[in-house]
Amino acid sequence: MKKLTLIFTSLLLILMTGCSLEPPEWAKPNNGGGPGNMKLGLSISTLNNPFFVSVKDGVLAEAKKLGMEVLVIDAQNDSAKQSNDVEDLMQKGVNALLINPVDSSAISTVVQTANSLNIPVVTLDRSADKGDIKALVASDNVKGGSMAAEYIIEQLGKGAKVIELEGSPGASATRERGKGFHEIADTQLDVIAKQTADFDRTKGLTVMENLLQGNPDVQAVFAHNDEMALGAIEAIQSSGKNIPVIGFDGNEDALKSIEAGKLTGTVAQQPALIGQLAIQAAKDVLDGKTVEKLIAAPLKLVVKE
């Protein structure tokens, strides 16, 4: 009986060790020797969106300048996958984590795990609801939402009937862009319908087709990102209508669409700059410097000249 008890205890200890997120000794972060020895983990919400491809490119370009290694993982818009991905990055002994959350709430648990392991976390474009985030590098999403509403009023006047295409429900960018938009729209516009299309172009097309059928008197559309805006434009063109659409991001496809006279405008971010600023923030944190909790990248409204 004693022998069986010893075997059971040993197996239990092995299982507990295997489930720990504490990285093995060979993979533990090496914080000495300058940036050339630094290994960072980057978790991107989706590389199926050109905006986040530009964010990633900005991260890699700035890291290369500094001689830092970056491990990149695509969460494919799956919050559960992203949590597992970040756990894997911690197991690989990264010195810091750069996270662009799929869902600001769902990512909180692994952020708190990183905190417990003293791995600093910097978030990009979207924040985490809980945990210690050293810095959020993002555009002022609330201001951007207000800019879109103000432009619609300028072009169509107060009381214009507007449809809002919302981003992923759990993303901080969705909440913030919607908040800024409604701070103006709730008193000066008539938002006749709003529905999520998850920041996705195909869903933007489908959702817009359905909303057009139920709201034939719509005068303008505000989409929380360019991908949904471009999908909405396809639906509007197929219907034979001419309805102005304002997107958000300023990605390459959107800028081309504006130049072609299709998309009306976009609240343009600077995704590559967001990536660069995130690397700089992570380096400063690892160097023991104090960084701002919110590092803002400038916005501008782009319309056809």
Image: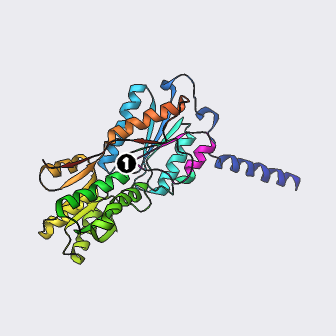
Residue neighbourhood size for the residue with mark 1, other residues' Cα within 10 Å, grouped as few (<14), some (14–19), many (≥20)? many
User: Where residue 116 sits: x, y (%)?
Assistant: 63, 44
Residue 88 percent coordinates (x, y):
53, 45
Q: Position of residue 87 (x, y in %)?
A: 55, 47
Q: Residue at x 25, y 67 (%)?
A: 162
Q: Is residue 193 left or right of residue 103?
A: left
Query: 2 or 98: nearer the eye?
Result: 98
Against 172, is 291 above or below? above
Total number of numbered discs in the rendering: 1
Asked if one can make out residue 217 in the rendered structure from this viewpoint, the answer is yes
- Residue 34 horizontal side relative to residue 238, left or right: right
Q: Which residue is mark 1?
A: 140
Looking at this view, name the residue that lies furthest to the top.
Answer: 33
**Residue 13 inside the magenta-drawn segment:** no
Image quarter hosting the N terminus? bottom right
**To which quarter of the image does residue 278 belong?**
top left
- Find residue 279 and report its horizontal and vertical position in percent: 43, 34
What residue sits 32% from the left and 56% below the top? Answer: 145
- Relative placement, left or right, of 241 versus 113 is left
In magenta, the rendered stretch is 110-133
51 on left or right of 137 = left
> Does dot 1 land on a helix, a strand or a loop?
loop
For residue 285, above or below residue 294 = above
Residue drawn where x is 59% and y is 49% of the image: 112
What kind of residue is marked 1?
Asp
Q: Is residue 121 magenta?
A: yes
Residue 226 appears in the figure:
no
The coloring applied to the image is: rainbow
